[in-house]
Image (cartoon, rainbow, N blue to C red):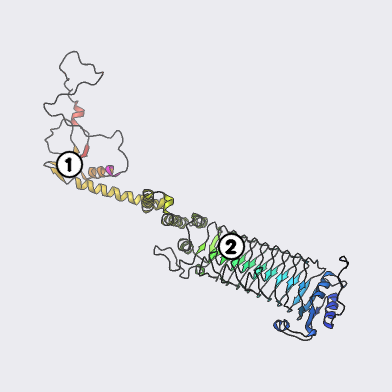
Amino acid sequence: MDETKPPPMLIDVTELEQQVVDTARRGEVAKPAITMTVEELAVTDDPDLRVRADLIRELLRGLRGGLDPRGVRIEGVRVVGQLDLIQVTAVTGLNLSRCALPDGIRCEQAHLRYLSLNRSLLAYLSADGLRVDGGLFLRGATITGAGELGALRLLSAHIGGPLELERATITNTAGPALNADGLRADDNLLMGGVTFSGAGARGAVRLLGAHIGGAFELDQAAITNTTGPALNADGLRADSELFMRAATITGAGELGALRLSGAHIGGQASLWSFRLYNSSGPLLELPEAQITGALLFPPEVVCPASPHGTSRRGCPYSDRTITVHGLTYSTLREISWRQWLHLLVHHTPTYWPQPFQQLAATERAAGHDNNAREVLITQQDELRRRTPEALGNRLAQWRHGLWGWLGRYGYRAHRLVAALVVILTLAAGLSLLAGQVTTHPGHHAAERVPPATANPNAPGTPCSPVELIGLGIDRGLPSAPPASAPTATSTPPPAGDKPSPPPSGYSKPSSGAWPPSPSPPTPDSSANPPDRHRLT
C-alpha cells in the first residue's frame, strides 16, 4: 500500500450525510427532520440521525471541495465513531450544536478556525496543544469521562478568542474534570454556572500556569472534589478581573479547596457570596498571590461568626483556615480591616509578618494611621504568642511583653507619657509623706541639709511642700543628677581621731601647727548657705 496516497473518501453517504456536505458548501445548518434529546441521540440507531465522524474529518480537511467560511454546522445528530482531528489543519470552523458524540473528540495539536460544541453531549474532549484562531464554545455542554488524564483536556492549548463553558456539566470519576495546565486564552474565560466534578489529589479543575487575556469568571459555579483540591490554579495569570460570586467550592485534603498560589489578577478579585468547604484542610491557599485591584472577600467565607475584631478567647471556627502570606492587594472591600485582622489572627495556620504589614500599609494609604498602628501592635502580640522562640530567651520574651504592655511596642507613645506621670506622681507623694515622718527627735525623713557650721545637735529644718515635691520628682526621674548638683557635706571626724596626713605633693607651711586652722567663713557664705534638702 502506498502510504503517500490519501485515504479513500466515504462513497456510500446517507441522505443526512449528503445534506451535511451540501449545507457546508452553502454555509447553512444541517439538521434532521426528527428531534431528540442529546441523551436519546447518544443511543439511537436511526440512520436518519447519524453522521459518521470520518465525513466531518473529510470536510474540515477540504477533501469535499470548497466550503463556506461560516464552517461546517450541524445540529441535533449523533456522530458515529471517534472524531479524530489530531494534527488536522482545518479549512473552516466546526459547529456541532445539540449533538451527541458518545465516542468523544481528539484534536491534539490541531489547528482549527473555531470550535463550538454548545449543548452537546461528549464522552471526552482531548485537545492538548490545540490551536484555535477564534473561540472555543462549550456552553451548556455535557462531558462525562473517566480516567486520570481528564474529561476535558486543554494542556498548553492556545485559544485566540474566548473560552466559554457557561452552564456546562463536566464530570470525571477518576481524575480531573478540566485539565488545562499551561492554557492560553487571549480573551475571557467564562465559566458562569458551570458544574465540575472531579477526583484525585491533582484537583477537579486544573489551571496551573494558565494565562487568561481577559476576565476569569466563575459566578455561580459549583466545583467538587472529595479527594483533593476543587480548583488548583497555582501560577494562574488573569489580565483582568476574577469573579467567583455565589460560587460553591468543595474540596478535601491538606492542599486546600481553592488554590491560587502565586496567581496574578490584573483587576479586582470578587468573592462575594462565595462558599468554601474543606473538612480536612485549608479552605483557601493564596500565598504570594498578587491582586492589582480590590479584594472583595466577605468574612463569612471563612468565619461564619463574622466578628468585628480580634479576641483573646479565640474563635470557634478556627479550624477553617486560609494561607495568605505574600498576598498583595490595593484595598479590601466587603470586609473591614478588623474582620480581616481577625482572619489573620485566628484563621491562619502559622505566623507570618507580611500579611499584617500589608494590611497596615493598606490602612495607612487610606489615611487611617491609627488603624495601621493597631494592626502592627497585634502583629507583635502574635509574634510573642505564636513564635516566642524568635524573640530569644525567656528574659528577652519578658522584656518584649513588658515593652508591649508599657508602650505598645512604640506605637502608643502616650502610654509611656502616662506611665512617667504616674511614676513622678508616686515619687512626689512619697516625698511629701517623707517630710512628715519623724526619724528621731527633731528630724524628719526628708529635711533641709544644714550648713557645715551648724550645730549637729540642732533640730532639722523641715522642707516646704514645694521643695518636697521637687525632691520626689528629682528622685523619680530615670536619669542621673547633674555633676553640678549640691551634695551633703560630711560631718567632722569624732574627737580623738588623728587628722589625715597632707595629700601627696602638698607643701607644708614654714611656720604654724599642722593641720592649719581653717579660714573663717566670709560673711556672704556663712550668712546665706545654699538651700539644700536631703533624705535622711
Point out which mark residue 198 bears.
none
Q: Quadrant of residue 196?
A: bottom right
Q: Neighbour class for label 1 at 10 Å: few (<14), some, many (≥20)?
A: some
Point out which mark residue 260 bears.
2
Q: Quadrant of residue 529?
A: top left
Query: Could you tell me if residue 299 is visible in this image?
Result: yes
In the foreground, 379 or 364 = 379
Q: Are marks 2 and 1 in contact (CB under 8 Å)?
A: no
In the foreground, 76 or 303 = 76
- Residue 445: horizontal and vertical position, in percent? 18, 43
Residue matched to label 1: 462
Q: Is residue 378 left or right of residue 273?
A: left
Q: Height in image: 142 above or below 458?
A: below
Q: Is residue 130 left or right of residue 175?
A: right
Which residue is most to the front? 1
- Residue 333: horizontal and vertical position, in percent? 53, 64
Q: Height in image: 487 above or below 131?
A: above
- Looking at marks 2 and 1 on the same chain, the residue that comes earlier in the sequence is marked by 2
Which secondary structure is most common in the magenta stretch?
loop
The amino acid on which the numbered mark 2 sits, given as a three-letter code, is Leu
Please name the residue shown 25% across and 34% down the image: 486
Magenta extent: 474-493
